Image (tube, rainbow, N blue to C red):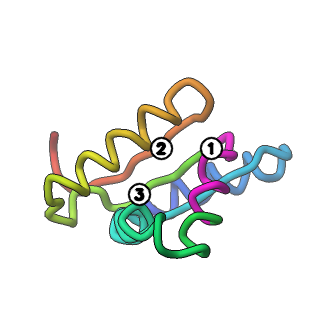
Amino acid sequence: MGKTHLTLSLGYQAAEEEYKVSFVTMVGLIQLLKTEDISRKSKLRLNRIYASAVVIIDEIGNLSIDHKGASLFFHLISGLHEQSSIILTSNKGF
């Protein structure tokens, strides 16, 4: 069983127990964060992520992130850390 499959199983179980769950890849998340101010769709998707009890961010080690992307990601995690459970997957060591 892979990392993504395991996290999807955890997310599915949380949804079955009526928690709001969001799943996003790191590539998709950085795109959402960078386009939040110009795209209504991105803003709505990020609002859903902020409203989720469980946020799954997949493959965070597979993308080289620029300074702006890293800052936006840090602010997202800071906004989520007291209200949501955050699950991160990576194939890289920290």
Range covered by the magenta-colored residues? 45-53
Can residue 2 be seen in this snapshot? no
Q: Nearer the viewer, residue 71 or 26?
A: 71
Q: Amino acid at mark 2?
A: Ile
Can residue 38 be seen in this snapshot? yes
The residue under label 1 is 54
The residue under label 2 is 87
Asked if residue 51 is among those painted magenta in the image, a careful observer would answer yes
Q: Position of residue 49 (x, y in %)?
A: 60, 53
Asked if residue 28 is among those painted magenta in the image, a careful observer would answer no
Residue depicted at 68% across the width and 52% down the height: 21
Q: Secondary structure at mark 2?
A: strand
Specify which label sits upstream in the sequence, 2 or 1: 1
Q: Is disc 2 in contact with disc 1, using a CB cutoff of under 8 Å? A: yes
Q: Secondary structure at mark 3?
A: helix
Quarter-of-image position of residue 1: bottom left
Q: Amino acid at mark 3?
A: Lys
Number of residues whose C-alpha sits closer than 10 Å to that of mark 3, classed few (under 14), some (14–19) or many (20 or more) = some
Q: Nearer the viewer, residue 9 or 29?
A: 29
In the image, which disc is placed on residue 3?
3
Q: Nearer the viewer, residue 63 or 73?
A: 73
Specify which label sits upstream in the sequence, 2 or 3: 3
Q: Secondary structure at mark 1?
A: strand
